[in-house]
Structures are given as structure tokens and as C-alpha cells.
Amino acid sequence: MLEIKPISAFNDNYIWLLRQTGGVSAAVVDPGDAAPVIQHLCREGLWLEAILITHKHGDHVGGVRELKRAWPEVVVYGPAGEPIPAVEQALSGGQRITLNGVGAEFLVLDVPGHTEGHIAYYGQDSLFCGDTLFAAGCGRVFSGTHKQLHHSLQLIAALPPETLIYCAHEYTLDNLGFAAWVEPDNPALVQRRQDAEEMRAKNNPTVPSRLDLELLTNPFLRSSEPVVIAAAERYTGGRLQTPDAVFTAIRSWKDREYD
Ligand SMILES: [Zn+2]
């Protein structure tokens, strides 16, 4: 059985570790820091087969060089559309990769917006989406565009509802606070906030979340909902004609007023 565990890094990053139960091969997603990964793999007696990178930011790639020194045979996968010198297998949407030792297969999705060439890895009912979709939120627009990010989120929204969303940061409580600005009366959101507060009080991760819960509670996946449209129009003070415009307004509102 495929096991997926978080390795905590920096303040709030999760580096996802994949392995078969009882297996010795491992893969990691977005190792921004090598030290906690090396420590974990050595403690568990694991060998690093693959590194999967979603995008170019330092807190996602900073540990790759050192991991490559420690495990020279590791294969480094990453986006074709971003300048990441350590990437050996450059990937674009539609390609598939197989990790034989780990026993996992992934379909690559192009999900630009947070950055211009961001990719995600989908397989085994799981999505590793870096900084594109967060639990109850989404990434900021840095080197991509709002329109790209909204399109990428809609692509993710169309995956099977039971898909587990493995994002790269523990931002959930903060994101739920903003979500409540947008939809204060959404009962699923009120419940989710209570649940997340309990999880964090016990120091448990709130990630992964399920896509169906995101669809009910994440304002960035709900740009066609009347309540969300109304909230976005209250913020901009004018009519918003398209879901893209609603998304852009909500994202800007969070950037300017909440974060
Ligand atoms: Zn990032």
C-alpha cells in the first residue's frame, strides 16, 4: 500500500514522502530543505528514488542539490516551463511518470498561475499541487496570471471528488478565516473551521483535504456561486460579469485586505 507522510520544513511547509508499506524506495515532493528529508530517510532506512518538483520557488527546490549528493541515482522530475537547473526529467501536462520502486504512477497536469510553469502530479487518488490549490485557499499570483490560476483551479475541480489534495503549506486556519469573510453563513465552512481548529490544537496536519470538501468551502473554487459573486461585487463596488472576474476580485481582496 502506498503511504504518504508529511515531513515538516521551515515554518509551515510540508514535504510529502511516498513509499510502499515495508518498501525501501521513497520519493519526495518539493524538498525545499534537505536536512529533515535526510534525517527521515536515514531513520527509516529508505533510499531516495525520485524527487518531484511542482515549481521553481526556493522553499520547494532548495534541498534538491544536497539530496542529489546524498543519493546520486535519484531522478529529479520538474516542470519544463520553469528555469530549475536541477531538473533532469522536464515534464509538461499530459505526460505520465512511473516510479517503479515506490510503486506509483502519476499524470502531469499543467497548473500555471502561481508561477508561469507550475505543474501538479495526479495519481493513486491523490494530487500533489504545490502552491496552486491550498486547503480552503489558493496560491498568490506571482509569475503567472489570475486567469491562468483560475483555469488551473477549474481543472483541479474537475478531478474525482474523492481526490486527496496534498498541498505544500499548512495555511488552512488562516485561509478559513478569509473564507468566512466571503461566506460567513456557509454551514460546511463553519463546520470545517471547527474541525481544523481541533486538528491544529492537537498539532495534527489539516492536509491532505478531500476535493469534495474544497468544492463546498474553498472560495477560490466557488466563483460561480451567487453568494461568492455577491461578496466579490461588494468588495469591488461594481458588477462582475465572468467567473474569472469574480475569482480575480476574491484573490485581490485577500491579498490587499486580509493577508
Ligand atoms: Zn510557491
Image (cartoon, helix red, strand yellow):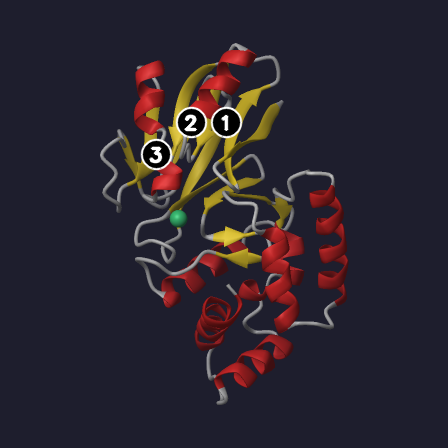
Asked if one can make out residue 227 in the rendered structure from this viewpoint, the answer is yes
Give the x, y percent position of residue 24: 52, 12
For mark 3, does the 10 Å Cα neighbourhood hold few (<14), some (14 to 19), or many (20 or more) residues? some
Look at discs 3 and 2 and give the one toward the viewer. 3
Q: Mark 1 falls on what kind of element?
A: strand
Left/right of residue 47 with respect to residue 61 in the rendered view: right
Residue displayed at 65% across by 46% down: 162
Instruction: State which tag comes first along the sequence, 1 or 2.
Output: 2
Q: For marks 3 and 1, give the one nearer the viewer.
A: 3
Question: What residue is shown with label 1?
Answer: 104
Residues 54 and 175: in front is 175
Residue 62: numbered disc = 3
Q: Are marks 3 and 1 in contact (CB under 8 Å)?
A: no
As shown in the figure, which amino acid type bears the numbered disc 2? Thr
Determine whether the residue tagged by mark 3 lies in a helix, strand or loop: loop
Q: Is residue 18 above or below residue 91?
A: above
Asked if the residue at label 1 sits under 8 Å from ligand 1, the reply is: no
Q: Are marks 1 and 2 in contact (CB under 8 Å)?
A: yes
Mark 2 surroundings within 10 Å by alpha-carbon count, few (fewer than 14), some (14 through 19), many (20 or more):
few
Q: Is residue 240 left or right of residue 77?
A: right
